């Protein structure tokens, strides 16, 4: 019974109040924009833009310019799981170490083959 009373308690937590305080201006601005956009001049302009964008030549031009490609790229970037700072430092160190080892190996092979070919050609 006590659990039901606690669950029905409408007082918000401090964290929720803090978040609500930060998001309040954003919510008010969004409500204002929704209100303005549904008033007569902008509502008709929005419907006209939507109609214009659905015409075949305009869709074709959008396809040529690659709007779908850009939108798909943005969607993909949002789905990426980015590494933490520690992981990125560790992976960067691994890349640097591998690059130094591989570069020195290539430099050694280049130096050795250079010496061998100089002796063969100059002989």
Image (cartoon, rainbow, N blue to C red):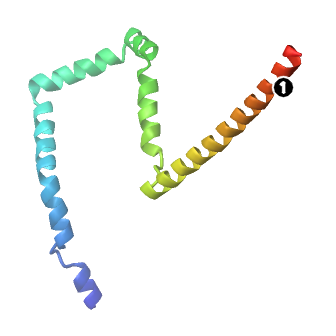
At a point 25% along the width and 19% down the height, the residue shown is 49
Task: Say whether residue 38 is visible.
Answer: no
Q: Residues within 10 Å of mark 1 (few under 14, many from 20)?
A: few
Image quarter of residue 46: top left
Locate residue 80 relative to residue 97 in the image: left or right. Answer: left
Mark 1, secondary structure of its residue: helix
Residue 76 x/y as whole percent = 47, 38
Observer-nearest residue: 72 or 89?
A: 89
Residue 42 x/y as whole percent = 14, 25
Locate residue 15 relative to residue 114 in the image: left or right. Answer: left
Locate residue 9 relative to residue 118 in the image: left or right. Answer: left
Image quarter of residue 15: bottom left
At a point 12% along the width and 43% down the height, the residue shown is 29
Task: Say whether residue 62 is visible.
Answer: yes
Q: Quadrant of the C terminus?
A: top right
At a point 41% along the width and 22% down the height, the residue shown is 67
Q: Quadrant of the N terminus?
A: bottom left
Observer-nearest residue: 41 or 106?
A: 106
Residue 31 x/y as whole percent = 13, 43
Where is mark 1, residue-wise? Answer: 116
């Amino acid at each position: 019974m006590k659990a039901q009373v606690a669950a029905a308690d409408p007082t918000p937590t401090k964290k929720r109040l803090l978040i609500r305080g930060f998001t309040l201006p954003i919510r008010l601005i969004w409500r204002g924009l929704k209100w303005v956009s549904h008033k007569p001049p902008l509502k008709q302009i929005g419907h006209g833009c939507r109609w214009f964008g659905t015409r075949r030549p305009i869709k074709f031009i959008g396809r040529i310019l690659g709007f779908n490609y850009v939108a798909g790229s943005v969607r993909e970037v949002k789905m990426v799981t980015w590494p933490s700072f520690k992981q990125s430092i560790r992976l960067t160190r691994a890349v640097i170490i591998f690059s130094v080892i591989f570069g020195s190996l290539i430099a050694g092979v280049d130096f050795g083959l250079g010496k061998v070919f100089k002796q063969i050609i100059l002989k």
